[in-house]
Image: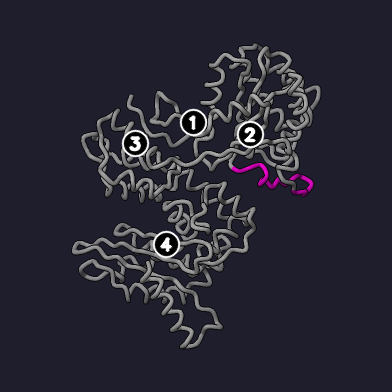
Amino acid sequence: MEKFFNTAGPVEAEDHYLLNPLTRWDLKEIEILIKQKKYFLLHAPRQSGKTSTILALQEYINKQNGNEVVIYVNVESAQVARHNVDVGIKTIIAQLGSEVEDVLDIDNIQKEFLDIFNLIGGPGALFSVLKSLCKKSDKRIVLFIDEIDSLIGDTLVSVLRQLRTGYEKRSKGLFPISVILCGLVDIKDYEIHKSDGEIITGGSCFNIKSESLTLGNFSRKEIETLYLEHTKETGQVFEDGVFDLIYEYTDGQPWLVNALAYQVCFKIKAHRDRTIKITVKMLKQAKEALILSRQTHLDQLADKLDEPRVRSVIEPMILGLDSSASAKDKTYCKDLGLIKSYKKTEIISNLIYREVIPRELTNGVQLNFGTRYPTPEWVNDDETINNDKLIELFVEFWRENSDAWKSDLAGYVEAAPHLIFQGFLQRVANGHGTINREYALGNGRVDLFLEWESPIKTQNIIIELKMRNETQNTPASLEKIKDKALEQTAEY
């Protein structure tokens, strides 16, 4: 069967096009940390390849037939336990027992683990189970715990503290010599809400980590290498410029890179004919279809926008203003993959996320425009854009409906004019054009570039959004705002 680009779960070499997961971090450094009996973290944004990487590392180490054996356990199934420590720890122990039986070929170990739980209870059972396992094994145990930050409240605190309790016993062979915790963000950024209302940080209950490692995005060269695997397999080729555009759209974010390739090569039925060359135009269409599909990755990204510490960073960015958000909140957004540093400021991580964020926040606005203007009045008879009419219709809509729509913007009230205009513009572009958005913290501007395709020509329309407050409500101040906008538009 033909291989394909993976967009869900760990990569499998027999099914998926892939880059060697072990090349995505410093393998020698990892081996040294394990030999030094370190407890450390691997964190990266969702669907960046974390699980694929640590599973590949497990396979690599276990094939060495050395003094260490890696046990991998995914604890996400314990998320539903929330603050119920007994339920959470029992779920983790049962999963751990199943993994141990598979790797060490020890019969009935899961039952033994559950017997320990029944005797001791959740707050101490994980510690005792791991201690018992290390006594049974003739090799030193290395433990990989995946999706650690999916755990909630008291259950997460209990897991971290039981690992910390066993840390000092690892040199005596009574506890895993090394532990890798794998999740979305660095443990120091965990804000754990306990059942009694207390909020603690991950670092306060797991102060034994030695390193915090992360996975980077794919490089431009790695994108090309990955896509050319498809060419080798099927003979289907990519037009010059496709790889550059993929990198421009995604900044190398692994899920986006794979999702765009799957969309353009597999999802669009006409492109399954492998004699068809994949072009830049096809890729643009695939990008739009991917955004409209609202796949799980993009939905999860959008869900984060409701979090206060994310909103404190993203809203000023939409406005082009300086942010009062803490450095911790900015780091949290970087760990989630939402933003990145660029030229001494912060910007949205990639072009696709720049489109997804305002679209998600203004989805209802776009639908409203669609029902109000079934035959767009901003389009001339020759299907070109009528700029004056477009702005006139938006101003009319804003005056009539802005107060009602502000309540639907997930708390982004200050950015309502910018967001609602972008929602309107998205409706304008629908099916006939594309929008490029530029926004960053502290640049004092929001640039929108509408590329409109009509039968007779392509229009490039630059829009500079400016806010005027009541203190600037004079002819002189208005002229000053206009002059500044024209200056910035010329620069753009």
| Dot 2: element | strand
Element marked by disc 1 = loop
Q: Residues within 10 Å of mark 3 (few under 14, many from 20)?
A: many
**What mark, if any, has residue 10 been given in the picture?**
1
Image x and y of residue 44, in percent: 55, 41
Say which residue label 2 marks.
181
At horizontal 77% and vertical 27% (from top left) the residue drawn is 168
Tell me the amino acid under the disc marked 4: Gln
Callout 4: helix, strand or loop?
helix
> Residue 71 has which mark?
none
Residue lying at the far right of the rendered structure: 120
Q: Which residue is mark 3?
A: 227
The quadrant of the picture occupied by the N terminus is: top left
Secondary element at image label 3: helix
Question: Residue tagged by mark 4?
Answer: 366
Give how far apart the Cα atoms at labels 4 and 1 are.
36 Å
